[in-house]
Amino acid sequence: MKRLLESELIYGRLLTVDAPHLIARYNKALKGFGLPETKLERFDIDMTGFSPEIAEELGDRDYLDPLRVNRRFIILTPEQENLPVVHTSFSNTAGLMHEFYRANARAISAVTIKDALYGEIEDSVAKVEHIEDLLSINEVNFRVHSAEDILGKASELRMLADQLTSQPEAWRDDAMLNRMVELAKITGDIRQNTLVPDQLVFRHEAFWADHFGGVYVFHDARNTTVICRADAPGFRKARPWQVSYIDIDDHETLYGFLARTRRIQLPQASWVIASGLYQHRMRMIVLGLAVAKDPNFDADRADMVWLQTWAHMNADQVLADGGYPLLSEMLRVADTTGSIRMPDIAARNRFLLIRAEPSHPDQWLVNRLIASLQPHDFVSRFIFDKQGFYKAYETYPEKFREHVVKTLESTYLKDKAGFRRRLCGIQEE
């Protein structure tokens, strides 16, 4: 992982915390969670306040994600909204946090001048043991506290102010007036500063969960679809009258669902040729086959000419996999005819020829699903399925790891938005 850390391919773009008053606030939040305080004088945090250094110090990567549900958060500054989420059990954690930041921007800005916000993204489940537990999560509630109890003090001051205006004799109560002055010194003028977050409840939309080998949950108008391994507890048993289940290895049914619900973009020359996606996937496949045959081969010299030569010299291995010749032929077909007849393609190979529909709100989740089905494509795995990428990276030979990092640095990291737009059609604001 050292090479990933140095290249900021893991725990990249985090916010450094080294100011003593911020560390003190962070420690009060940890104490509020019943956790030991950190002794570190410097550490980095992500959007949720997760710190890889503190995780290592505590010996618990899930210190803000106990039981991998009801995710905790610590907010020291509004700047955290622009950070990534580097450790999570749900794909929509970042989305929910963004909604919370945006809906409560004024309160977060006001509170974090003097305090830190902490709490958890609470839902109806305490522990995920069954698919039904995931299906029961329809909305989440942000339960929020503050390290210095500014939220509590602001609420108390508002209550006293209400009493002052509603009770005719309240202004004679010196103790109450003195308490209001004492509280106002801490909270400021609550008539001008909104200290209490306004919106705390948010919808839990389509998501991926890191349970039972990975579970995808998609919502349509009248139906919910669960995609996972068939041995997941509750598969086809939880709400069978309401939920459709697809075994992730049942490529025919899986493709049919994505196509029927218009979550995928079928191959048309208009995007296939311009995107370079097929050429990219061809390169990824041959690289994967080459490293499988010789873990010590020099991938840095593997340009397209070398890859084509290797493919010809190792035709049996390439034909057994089938991906490279299919992509090569379908690239030619798309260029000459303008489209590809998907019914003629074996179900297991169709995912090589598609990408998520860029206009669909589930495009990131669908691209994650497609990437997870293509183990050779480490670039797409890194973009859309980081958990899968990191697990795969641990299995790579050392020499190939070096090439993987160089490739990501020279392609994706140079222009992330541009790379996603070209390869996957993602248009970002």
Image (tube, rainbow, N blue to C red):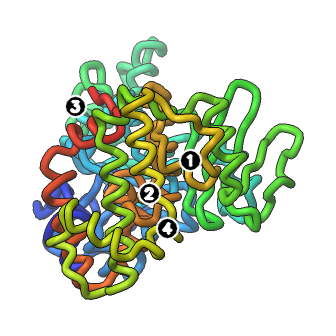
Question: To which residue does mark 3 refer?
Answer: 188
Q: Given contact means CB atoms under 8 Å apart, are the residues at marks 3 and 2 in contact?
A: no
Q: CA distance from mark 1 to mark 4?
A: 16 Å
Left or right for 366, reference 41: right
* Residue at 40% over, 36% down: 100
| Mark nearer the N terminus (3 vs 4) | 3
Left or right for 291, reference 347: left
Amino acid type, label 2: Pro
* Residue at 19% over, 80% down: 298
In front: label 1 or label 3: 1
Q: Given contact means CB atoms under 8 Å apart, are the residues at marks 4 and 2 in contact?
A: yes
Q: CA distance from mark 1 to mark 3?
A: 61 Å
* Residue at 41% over, 65% down: 376
Q: Which mark is residue 384?
A: none
Question: To which residue does mark 1 refer?
Answer: 350
Q: Which mark is residue 325?
A: 2
In front: label 3 or label 4: 4
x and y percentages locating residue 230 in the rendered image = 75, 62
Q: Is residue 282 above or below residue 259?
A: below
Tell me if mark 3 has few (under 14), some (14-19) or many (20+) residues whose alpha carbon lies within 10 angstroms of its own.
Answer: some
| Mark nearer the N terminus (1 vs 4) | 4
| Mark nearer the N terminus (3 vs 2) | 3
Amino acid type, label 4: Leu
